[in-house]
Amino acid sequence: MTSPLDPQQFDARQLDPAEARIDALARQAGGDLRRPAPTDGITRAKRAKHTKQMTRLGGAGIAAVAILAIGAFALNGGDADQTIVPATVSTFESDLTVPDSIPDPTESAPPVTEAPDETIAPTSTVPPGTSPVTSPTNAAGDPDVVYVGTDFSSLFGSEVSTVDPTTGAIIDTFVVDEAASDAARAAQDALVGLSTAPRSAIDSRPEIGVLDYEVPVGDLVYRHTVLPSEIPVLTDQDPDALPLFDRCQQAELSVEGAIGSALPARARSIVASPDGTRLAAVVSDCPVAGTLADGEPATGFDTSVLVFDASRPDLAGRAVVDGLDPFSLGSITFSEDGRFMAVEVFGAVGPRLFDLEARIELDLASGLGIDDGCTAAGTKWSRFIGPWVGGSSVAVTVSCDDGHRLVIRDLAKPDALLAVTLPAAAGAASFAVSADVDRAHFDRPETAWFTICDAGAVTCWVGRGNNPLVELPGVVQASFLPLGFEYGG
Amino acid sequence: MTESPADPTTVELAVSFDEFYRIEYPGLVAVATALTGSLESAEDLTQDTMVASLMRWQRVQRLERPGGWAHRVLLNRCTSWWRRRRTEANHLARLRRVEPSVAGPSPDSLAFWGAVRTLPERHRLVMVLHYAGDRSVAEVASILQVPEGTVRSDLTRARAALATQLGD
């Protein structure tokens, strides 16, 4: 293995003196931490493996009985670890037993695909390693078209095609004009507010660049002040604005119309569930007193997500997540009925999911044969709506070293599950895998319409439930929403 | 468990894992130590990662970078460790006692990695993987699944932040 500290690879002389000093310090400190493998380590690892295998064999029998009892699935069996495991105390573990429906890509024959053509040539394929299974009828209906593009972004002036989702046949190819761009933007805007309650930004403060957010919930109005961007350049801020924030960049949180308030005095951000039942406040344990008046923010502080009954801010909230790095915290979104909450955290295997009624954390990956080395990401429009695809269902793409999967699961009915393996790219490494789920016609995971794309293979697929996938070669993005506009594009 | 030398597959598999263990252990335990600040926990987390690797060894050994896979597993386990530690902290506060000191990294090194742990998560991870884990920029990018340019810029920013923090 080539050392990353090889001067040919990493030349400290290119660094400025301060950085070079840190580089040298880091090399020394890094070397100081490396210790040789313990002499008995391998033996202990093999003994632990043996013990775990024996435990799994015992667990497999219990799992098999549970599957027979609920009689839910007859798909690909295999891994004995088949339960959505609450991260804390389980109150319904036995109800969540589901089969592993993900085929092992390493045991699958490679897909028979033709080299991508210059044009979009629709073909229908069966995903490798699976026998065609006809999904039940989708009670919510079917989409008319899928929008596909040959570029990663489809902006004004780019070419977009519509294809038939059942055959892959091209219906139309057009250049994005103003009307198409507006339609795409409207479709994306319509997603906002589906997984959070609407909030209003009010630019009425005298301080430049600072906004007040108002979140109305019934007769109550929550108010919170925010800096205009997530990680602002504080020295560019209006000096009058900085005293509004503490060193963890938190501002006052208030509620109008309530008899009392148990809310934290300051918060980084707030968000309410779409049904107005719950309010989440992101709060940092600010270690430094004072305000941001001198423009010096604190770093390395712990951040928590507190959840309150949105109609009773006088009742104490509950810390659902804590110990977070604020810079690794992404969006917070809710299921339609506010029962479930999704917290995006950089470094976690997918979004962290919480059942706020049962007061447990759910591990979406557990029970699906997805190991610790995998990473998970949202679907194409999750930046607007989080992982939610309808009701209480979530969708994530899971990338492991042995392949990529789209997983759709109903958190309220965990046996309602769809797991689709991305067909292996022929002669190309998979990368930039993305997926979309048709929210407009979403009934339940087993009948969901979805697309999944592999930029490495320059191919997308469209499918419904476990039906055979329809291949769309020559494209790198496919969506059930119109393409032609991207925020920031 | 005794392995039969008559079975060439078993012997080859065992040797491969043994080599993997000896090569990857120093870097993994350094990464875990840097991220947790606890020598004891780092050894446990590294050993758990090794067991996870052995459990899936038939698949792991076929990967282009088995060590990269193991580092991803370890990072996930370190994240879980922090979660558990936060939960347990309140309960254990009253039971805390002084642990006997063991030989380990120098106080300066521990102070340095303590400073690294105050950095934003990705800056922290690139510093730890690159300097403690002895992983190249390309390997760090592969483990974190971000472009190499992002790793380089994160390293630059992290070093600059540390230079300010450890200025004197």
Image (tube, rainbow, N blue to C red):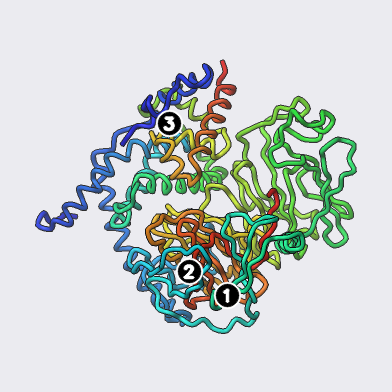
The residue marked by circle 1 belongs to what chain?
Answer: A
The residue marked by circle 2 belongs to what chain?
Answer: A
Disc number placed over residue A485 in the picture, else none = none
- Residue A253's image quarter? top right
Residue drawn 52% across the image and 72% down it = A417
Kindly identify the amino acid type of the residue bearing the numbered disc 2.
Val
Q: CA distance from mark 1 to mark 3?
A: 49 Å
The residue marked by circle 3 belongs to what chain?
Answer: B
Q: In this figure, which residue is indicated by the disc labeled 3?
A: B131
Q: Are marks 1 and 3 in contact (CB under 8 Å)?
A: no
Residue drawn 63% across the image and 33% down it = A299
- Residue A154's image quarter? bottom right
Which quadrant does the N terminus of chain A fall into?
top left
Q: CA distance from mark 2 to mark 1?
A: 17 Å
Number of labelled discs? 3
Q: Are marks 2 and 3 in contact (CB under 8 Å)?
A: no
Q: Is residue A389 visible?
A: yes
Q: In this figure, which residue is indicated by the disc labeled 2?
A: A420
Q: Position of residue B144 (x, y in %)?
A: 48, 45
In this rendering, the answer to whether A234 lies above or below A414 is: above
Q: Position of residue A472 (x, y in %)?
A: 51, 68
Determine the secondary structure under disc 1: loop
Q: Earlier in the sequence, mark 2 or mark 1?
A: 1
- Farthest left residue? B6
Q: Are marks 1 and 3 on the same chain?
A: no
- Residues packed near mark 1 inside 10 Å, few (<14), some (14 to 19) or many (20 plus): many
